Amino acid sequence: MAERAPPLIVGAGPAGIRAAMTLVAAGLRPIVIDEGYACGGQIYRQPLSPDGRDAQARYGSEAAKATRLQRDFAALGAQVDYRPNTLLWNLRDASADSLRDGVSQRILHDGLILATGATDRVLPLPGWTLPGVFTLGGAQIALKAQGCAIGKRVVFAGSGPLLYLVAWQYMKAGVEVAAVLDAAPLSAKLHLLRALPLAPDIVLRGLRMAAELALHGTQVQLGVSGLRIEGEGRVARIVYQTGGRRHAIACDGIGYGLNLRSETQAADLAGCAFRFDPRDRAHLPVRDSSGRSSVAGVYLAGDGARIAGADAAELAGERAALALLEDRGLPHAPARAASLERRLVRIGRLRDALEAAFPFPAHWGADIADDTLLCRCEDISAGDARRAIGHFSLTDVNRLKAVTRIGMGRCQGRMCGAAAAELLAAQTGRDIGAVGRLRAQAPIKPIPLAMSLSVDERQHDPAH
Amino acid sequence: MPLLHRLVRTDSAVIFFTIDGVPCEGRAGDTVLTAVLCHTDRLRHSEFSGEPRAGFCQMGACQDCWVQLASGERLRACTTPLAEGMHIVTTRGRSHG
Ligand SMILES: Cc1cc2nc3c(=O)[nH]c(=O)nc-3n(C[C@H](O)[C@H](O)[C@H](O)COP(=O)(O)OP(=O)(O)OC[C@H]3O[C@@H](n4cnc5c(N)ncnc54)[C@H](O)[C@@H]3O)c2cc1C
Ligand code: FES
């Protein structure tokens, strides 16, 4: 009898690692692929080479979790077929196309766990393409993984828990943090009271960070709008409004972001059904409480399915793996599964409160000035988009994409997708959930052109 | 004027490379993005507007940081480790589009 193909896990962050451990404990040998050079995902990202800092210096309060997760994954050794530096770029029935060192390989799998994580969510600002402007995540990666600061006098702007976290990490690293410009008004922060009993440590840590920043001389400003970044060839200042007054702060680096967006392209190519999620203001792959998607044998875990943070990602990774085991007729620890689900529900409530405390400034979408670039890849402006929407009476983002190329560039809508949807909704007076969702296309990310033919795994098994 | 400022790894092994023909030193553990932006303030110019760009997300999502080598090869600077003898060109890519 032919042996069953191994399960495939995409992503070696908290969700993917816990999923892998669960499958290994049940006697399977999953394949784990990740674009990154080392395991850990976004939050527990590792440096390219040792840089003299220990886990405490790199991960702060999350050092113990980072160390445990990375150590647990390393301990699996050859029990997993781990392939770092490997991009999943296409999915078809029971096979996946991966790319490593310019070589494409087709992976046959039986069971697919997508743990693809998230990246920053942004809306365009005037000047957001200037050198020196990075996403909040990008600013954190520079510091955490590369040991570099994005400037000597920096400003962090936008929304989301990362806003204060990254600003605080920069301050601790000795960088002058001139200001934290928070889009949310004070009234939104009252939702933290709702979060407090659910996770006192997390809420109090956040408040302490804001207080320490203020004590250190950082200007912490709530309810900002009208952000614009100025400079000749690079960042020189950030301009914003509060209560109808304009202010400017000189700086040479800016970290900007509006919370996170799930990486859902793989789920899309896998054929998963999507549904609009009002909280995340995004179309997300449908899954049940176990992580099963609408497609048999495809499971979803972590921030790639819905933003819930690293702790939830670990739990969801394990839960999804148990579902895979159950569907394979293997022992699947039902009591453990139920306990994981209860904890996920609790974290979900915390997340709801955090989202309310750091709301997405959706109205910014309608206010984007016509001459602001919407698409960084091909320099297409908000005005170009608005004219196309009006001229062709567009109501769907995929039509907008076809007409203007917004969402068709190299980033495939990762940076402009939210803005295109908000702008379309505002101009046509539709609900944001009713303007459609950008369809993912293979390759999920740009791949070398020369590499178009896939090598079948059964004929070719390069050493890895 | 550099865009990034190194806080650690200041005494890691040196890796030699060039930016637009000018010899530069990077450090073991640098990505191409880090190495270039520790020397200058741009990675490339937009092929549409000619405006300078220096990456954005640093996590392989925005694709803003693709640079060209003198050989014509293109690579994503934020996810590619710096290698000895890379000849990076930041000035091309202004004309077509
Ligand atoms: C830059 C950044 C910094 C963050 N920092 C923090 C923080 O300090 N504290 C906090 O609480 N939360 C942070 N977060 C939130 C973070 O999303 C979660 O805390 C946590 O990392 C989610 O775990 P995960 O396993 O779901 O996904 P991730 O940790 O994001 O892991 C997903 C993995 O999948 C891989 N992947 C995705 N698509 C593909 C593909 N097509 N092919 C191959 N590999 C792929 C990625 O390389 C990545 O390693 C951060 C998020 C970002 C984007
Ligand atoms: S900086 Fe975004 S892909 Fe490199």
Image (tube, grey):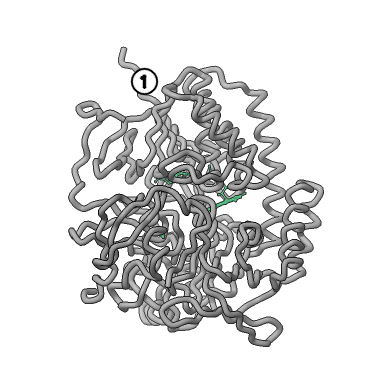
> Is A288 left, or right, of B74 in this rendering?
right
Q: Is residue A375 visible?
A: yes
Furthest toward the bottom, the residue is: A245
Furthest toward the front, the residue is: B11
Quadrant (top left/top right/bottom left/bottom right) for the C terminus of chain B: bottom left
Q: Residue at x 21, y 74 (%)?
A: B96
Residue B91 picture quarter:
bottom left
Residue B51 picture quarter:
bottom left
Q: Nearer the viewer, residue A427 or A18?
A: A18
Q: Residue at x 79, y 54 (%)?
A: A194
Q: Residue at x 61, y 57 (%)?
A: A173
* Residue type beneath disc 1: Arg
Q: Residue at x 62, y 68 (%)?
A: A176
Task: Kindly identify which residue carries mark 1.
Answer: A4
Q: Nearer the viewer, residue A111 or A160?
A: A160
Where residue A246 appears, as percent x and y from the top left, is 64, 86
Q: Is residue A283 visible?
A: no
Q: Is residue A372 above or below residue A20?
A: below
Quadrant (top left/top right/bottom left/bottom right) for the N terminus of chain B: bottom left
Q: Nearer the viewer, residue A454 or A398?
A: A454
